[in-house]
């Protein structure tokens, strides 16, 4: 299988209309990659695609796509294939962060979290892998996990979110083994607190500044990540510089997981 890194790779990014997904698209664009953006917000996807062209992308396409809907995912990948061919890389990144205690959580909310965070990654990988295998592309898949997939967050009320991220980490390890023989690598990025709209989803607007200050005091590096901090990890994992990495997690959390939970 041949790598397409030197000839304008095609990178498909889910949840690419904002935050880490958008930052990754723009960094890939600066490398001359072709970019396909899938996002539930079609306008945001198109705006990212336009920005990617300005940044130097060899081509860009933004599509509205709900990753919980297999028909939409399949149609999106078909349109991408019609325009650009098979992907070299996939950044399966779309996700939501909705909190709640388990005993109070409606089943519909639980399903929505897992359908978006876990099934959405499954569907993006499923349809992307089919195209990569058919075209015999040796490439790279990166999935977004979380430190919450390894430890319970101190703030609590994140059982469903953490369960989805832990499952993603398990899926990454299994896909890494299954597709290694085809030359396809599968890894995960685990972002810590990052300045994105999603990052403040569970915090009331009037409490954001107080929470930001508290986080900065507790994160060993003393600040929240910017989306570009996480995007640089993703672009690295998508590159041939990590040609011998598969089934791995890169934790980019400012040192949170390395730190004891007590302060003395």
Image (cartoon, helix red, strand yellow):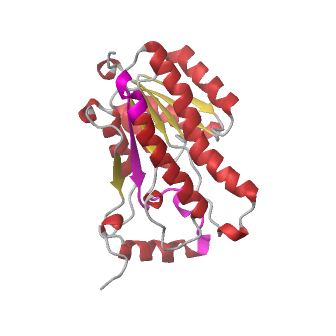
Q: Is residue 248 above or below residue 69?
A: below
Is residue 198 visible in the rendered image? The answer is yes
Q: Residue at x 39, y 55 (%)?
A: 226
Give the residues in magenta.
Answer: 177-206
The quarter of the image holding the N terminus is top left
Q: Position of 149 compared to 220: left or right?
A: right
In percent of width and height, residue 253 lies at: 36, 60
Is residue 192 placed above or below 207 in the rendered structure? above
From where the camera sits, is residue 55 visible? no
Q: Quadrant of residue 97?
A: bottom right
Please tell me which residue is depicted at 65% across the width and 67% down the height of the picture: 100
Quadrant location, the C terminus: bottom left
Q: Position of residue 29 (x, y in %)?
A: 39, 31
Query: Which residue is found at the position 57% from the left and 45% from the top?
Result: 118
Q: Is residue 180 magenta?
A: yes
Residue 222 position in % (x across, y down)? 32, 70
Measuring from the top left, give residue 210's x and y in whole percent: 49, 77
Judged from this view, the residue extending furthest toward the bottom is 264
Say left or right for 247 vs 175: left
């Amino acid at each position: 299988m041949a790598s397409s890194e030197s000839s304008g790779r095609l990178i498909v990014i889910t949840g690419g209309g904002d935050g880490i997904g958008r930052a990754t698209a723009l960094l890939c664009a600066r490398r001359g990659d072709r970019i396909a953006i899938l996002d539930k917000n079609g306008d945001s996807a198109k705006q990212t695609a336009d920005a990617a062209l300005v940044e130097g992308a060899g081509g860009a396409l933004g599509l509205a796509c709900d990753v919980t809907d297999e028909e939409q995912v399949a149609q999106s990948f078909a349109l991408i294939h019609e325009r650009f061919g098979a992907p070299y890389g996939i950044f399966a990144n779309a996700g939501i962060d909705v909190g709640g205690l388990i005993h109070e959580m409606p089943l519909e909310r639980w399903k929505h979290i897992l359908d978006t965070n876990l099934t959405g990654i499954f569907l993006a990988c499923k349809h992307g892998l089919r195209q990569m295998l058919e075209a015999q592309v040796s490439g790279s898949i990166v999935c977004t996990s979380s430190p919450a997939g390894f430890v319970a967050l101190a703030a609590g009320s994140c059982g469903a979110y953490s369960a989805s991220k832990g499952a993603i980490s398990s899926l990454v390890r299994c896909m890494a083994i299954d597709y290694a023989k085809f030359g396809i690598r599968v890894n995960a990025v685990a972002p810590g607190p990052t300045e994105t709209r999603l990052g403040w989803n569970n915090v009331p607007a009037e409490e954001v500044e107080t929470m930001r200050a508290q986080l900065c005091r507790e994160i060993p590096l003393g600040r929240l990540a910017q989306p570009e901090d996480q995007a640089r990890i993703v672009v690295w994992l998508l590159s041939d510089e990590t040609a011998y990495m598969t089934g791995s997690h890169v934790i980019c959390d400012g040192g949170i997981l390395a730190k004891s939970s007590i302060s003395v």
